[in-house]
Amino acid sequence: MKPPSFEYHVPGDVDEAVGLLADLGEDAKAIAGGQSLVPMLALRLANPEHLVDLRRLDGLRGVEERGGRVRIGAGTTQAAVARSAEVARSVPLMARATPLIGHFQIRNRGTVGGSLAHADASAEYPAVVLALDAELEAVSPRGTRTIPAGDFFTGLWSTALDEDELLTAVDLPVRSGRSGFAIEEFARRGGDFAIAGAAVAVELDGSGRVARCGIGLFGLGSTPLRAPGAEAAVTGAALTDIDADELGRTAVGELDAVPADLHASADHRAHVGAVIVARAWRRAAEEAANG
Amino acid sequence: MTGAPATGAPAAAARYAGTRVPRVEDPRLLTGHGTYVDDVVRPGTLHACFVRSPLARARIVGVDAAEALALDGVHAVFTAADLNPDVREQWYTLIGKDVPDTPRPPLAEGEVRFVGDPVAMVVATDRYVAEDAAELVAVDYEPLPPVVDYAAAGESGELVHEGYPGNLAGEFPGAPFEDVEPVFAEAPVVVRRTIRQQACSQVPIETRGIVAEWSAPSGELTIWAATQSPHEVRLFCSRLLGLPEQRVRVVMRDTGGGFGQKVIPQREDMCVMLAARKVPGPLKWIEDRRENLQSAGMSRHAHADTRIALGSDGAILAAAIDYVEDVGAYPVPWPVGTSAAVGMFFPGPYRVPKAAWATSSVFSNTSGRTAYRGPWQFESLARELLLDAAARKLGLDPAEVRRRNLLRRDELPYTNPCGIPYDDITPLETFEQALEMLDYEAFRREQERARAEGRYIGVGTCTYVEPTSAAVGLHATEGATIRIEPSGKVNVYVSGGSSGNSIETTVVQLTADALGVDIADVSTVQGDTAVTPFGGGAAGSRSGSMTAGAVGETASVLRERIIAIAAHRLEADPGDIELEHGRAGVRGVPESGVTLAEIANAAYFQPETLPPGVPAGLEASGRYRPEHPLVYANATHLCTCEVDIVTGAVKLLRYIVSEDCGPMINPNVVEGQIAGGVVQGIGNALCEHLAYDAEGNPVATTFMDYLLPTAAEIPDIEYGHVETPSPGPGGYKGVGEGGAIGAPPAVANAVADALAPFGAEITSLPLTPETIVALVRGGDGTVPR
Amino acid sequence: MADVTVRMRVNGGPRSASVPPRLTLADFLRERCGLTGTHLGCEHGVCGACTVLLDGQAVRACLVLAVQADGAEITTVEGIASPDGELSPVQRAFRDHHGLQCGFCTPGFVVSVTAFLRDNPGPTDEQIRDGLSGNLCRCTGYQGILKAVRAAAGAPGGTAAPEETG
């Protein structure tokens, strides 16, 4: 299980990096922490001719709060997110999702951008950015653009990023008002990819009705998913009128292609998914109600 | 009890045996200075990588290695035509050559028979290049329909191997079912279940590996191997290549776990041995994890039609098991003989008047069956599940049913209905101790309360008797050489080798006691066939008892000599000489004495001063041959758990093992062996599954899919000891395998007990969350939330 | 493919080498530095046997390319004990509590636990279990390891070394 050969590039800044990606085209792959890519190389499931290492792009690391948004550089490690008081205070869902990713040794290397760009359907961060309606910042030789999280995940391990485009940051709304957040997952063992998981963000209006609800699902499709029907069903409703179990069933009822593997059939994933959505909803709603 | 050897001069009072002596292996292993096979660096080493079949069954139409050979750094690509004809003799000392062994070609010849079957071996300057080249070897396959499901293999029109009709590798008729039919026909209560166990693998954290270095001028082959038995590797290699045994040397210092997988060389090892003489440098093969999970072997996969008949009072009247096991395409070793133990131990440590059994071993196009810690453990799984089912049917507590049937001490020796003569066991005592450690009655009360709150907790047990230290064939004897050096320091040589069983520490402890010296003055040399006595290796829970015997035999000769020399020098009666702290003194005369260093000095350098008839030097070799063919150990495992009936998650709450392995040489080692086995058994019960899809593709070839338990899933394990000496040296018994035997049924019974309100019956493993949810649903038909 | 020159400090000493970009840090340490205490148990980042400290942080050396570690400070298991061989507190605790058997996974546990206890002094039992869950052991059933970590942490449930002999 040794990686195949490739040419190695270490650009010094983002412009150089995207220039390389543009020149090298589909034969190139960007590597940040490498916690998803290196195993794929070792198993020879990925065979890039060129690897563009982002380790010198210091500007991509860090957490910054500004104008009601928190911007996390794509190169920020998951461990740094876990340590960030700003993230814990302003984007609690992101903070709560982080310890669920792999193990601490993985989080020491794995990055926010790597996790999002890898777009694993069973990973936590993609579901978080969906639930929060985050915006993803991407740079290419043509300039910088912002991609709404809802448009980012396009298919199995694929994203809206162009070949020459680099994810540089994720921009998240700071929690406000009476809001609550929860992430729940069910995995065979701690640290494993989830059989089913849900990230829920809920905000109440002054009268205690749901002003906004975001539900991100993971492990339940070929991509990270939103649960728009379930979100719509609770929006505008009073908390006391919402049946969490019903909400869970609604969320999984919207799914069309639940995956099946050694660890769980599609039926079991959907069953557990409904339970997990309900559990996440209860916790998020409780926090919002007490907020 | 002390560690007194069974024969020879009496030992000194045990000073180290029975205590938690820190391990002598640890300083090197904790600091990264162990020597595992992949750490062996020889000049000019070449690296092997296998080209493996991507298909479960196919005809090999052609192999084109031209592109691979053209790659820079590639030395050779071997196929079956290059290596297989060189095989002289291929059989294992462990099994003997007079069995109807199953086929075992080094490389696949003509047909591939499972995904991972080695077809060609690439040799290159490093493993990276070897993997590149392996991808370039073009094998032309003509797919054939595979036999994936062993359970249906008898009716399949396809054959895994020509010459084995019905894909039957072998069968053991055992004891006839007709003899018990009248009992079953008339018994007040009969429970009959088909019990199934999934395929699991041993999964040592170090994969397999071997380095072979041929010296043409001297005609010598040196092998470094990840093995549990260096002497078996040497014998096997000597026969395989037709080399005289003394020209083959096998070395292992550290092996990173084996659990049966490394007990004998497998096909890839054969390829490296065969190719070693054809390449210009030492040849190294280090298996990677994907290879390990797809090709290093499968175990456990089996099912059986099992029955138990009871009286209305709960007394067992008869038991019967018709066992069918999957042996894959290339079992290693011949599996049929081992399967008999499933039948013969099925009655377990219970009073069972009549029993019937039969076993059959069936080929499939999957990875071959290999030895795994307690290879016969299906008997305990089946029996203990049946007993719980019987208790539910009788309306009795499962503990009460066991109490009424477990063998009592006053009934021993007891020959079970399959002819196994149990003795020196304490099943009822371990059972009661385990229940007491839990406070079983209190748990039942807590369970009632929990159920009222909608929480589902349960308790399960397993009580078994286990054959250890079987003294036949390769394992019939064990040797030790002890050299008291001229300085009075001691080296002890046994076959051994560190593979996780702490045998270096054990040997040093026993030798220090036997010679009355400080433990710091004893070192051990192990794992090198060039310098150690022949030994059978770490298998069959034999190392403790057999090595104790070997050290005892040898040390008694030296003690006698030391005492004779000391008595002569001190002008005392030999019967008054005491050995302690590296010194020989005269009983009752504290001021007189002579140090072992002085005695050694005389023995080596002043032979003229020795008493008449005492040979010079202080070096001896001895060989232990047990008088008893088997040593029986027994234990009760008890597990409690809570089941989340909504998600199917199982949380283990407490895990108690009460065992009787006789006196403990080192409680740390005993408890470590138990814990390791238990956690493997928990993994087997809950999460491990070496699964295949319908086409015969393995689907658990990474650690993302083959799920080993982690520290987060495992409860603290509590130990209770009952101590009944065996007839062997020191009264010791084997303890290496039992943990893995008791855990699967204890866990399964605990889960079944938790789910009893749903009418759940557990008859197959693993207990995944999904199967548990299905059990809950199946029980009362409602869908849990 | 062109080799790349890397420079790092390994266990306090400078190391430089020209390496193929695909060489993993684990293989670099084992083959180029002769530090064979870093073990390979899975090569896909699950078992943790290859764990080393990279700039003080515990990482899987099989999931880092040697070129990615250019300029880094690496500590392997060989760098945990003092140069005269005196075991570190974590290593001593593993020895005192039977925290290892075959020893193959041990370097990864020692390195991981060293970093874990530095960053989590006085951990709860749940934190200890979570902190250990990224390393697989097949011999010990984790019992001795848990005791060792509790003892090294001075946490409740960690007992002093069991009785010595003599």
Image: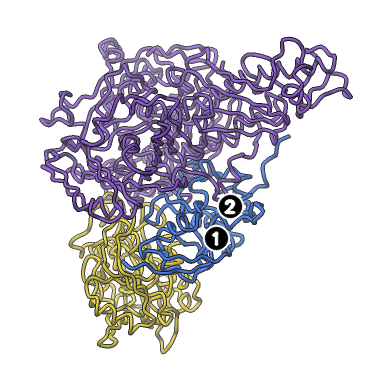
Q: Nearer the viewer, residue B397 or B417?
A: B417
Callouts 2 and 1 close, C-beta under 8 Å? yes
Residue B367 percent across, percent down from the top left: 27, 37
Quadrant for the C terminus of chain B in the image: bottom left
Q: What colour has chain A?
A: yellow
Left or right: B550 in relation to B708: right
Residue in view at x 21 percent, y 31 percent: B151
Three-letter code for the amino acid on which mark 2 is drawn = Val
Judging by colour alone, the chain drawn in blue in this rendered image is C
Label 2 belongs to which residue? C149
Vertical position of residue C65 compared to residue C102: above or below: below
Q: Earlier in the sequence, mark 2 or mark 1?
A: 1
Label 1 belongs to which residue? C116
Residue in view at x 46 percent, y 42 percent: B256
Q: Nearer the viewer, residue B306 or B599?
A: B599
Q: Residues within 10 Å of mark 1 (few under 14, many from 20)?
A: many
Q: How is the image coloured?
A: by chain
Vertical position of residue B739 compared to residue A93: above or below: above
What's the mark number on residue B695?
none
Q: What colour has chain B?
A: purple
Calculate the distance from the C-alpha at mark 2 to the C-alpha at mark 1: 10 Å
Q: For residue B86, what is the image quadrant? A: top left
Residue B249 percent across, percent down from the top left: 45, 31
* Element class at badge 2: helix
Chain bearing mark 1: C
Q: For residue C125, what is the image quadrant? A: bottom right
Q: Nearer the viewer, residue A120 or A4?
A: A4
* Element class at badge 1: helix
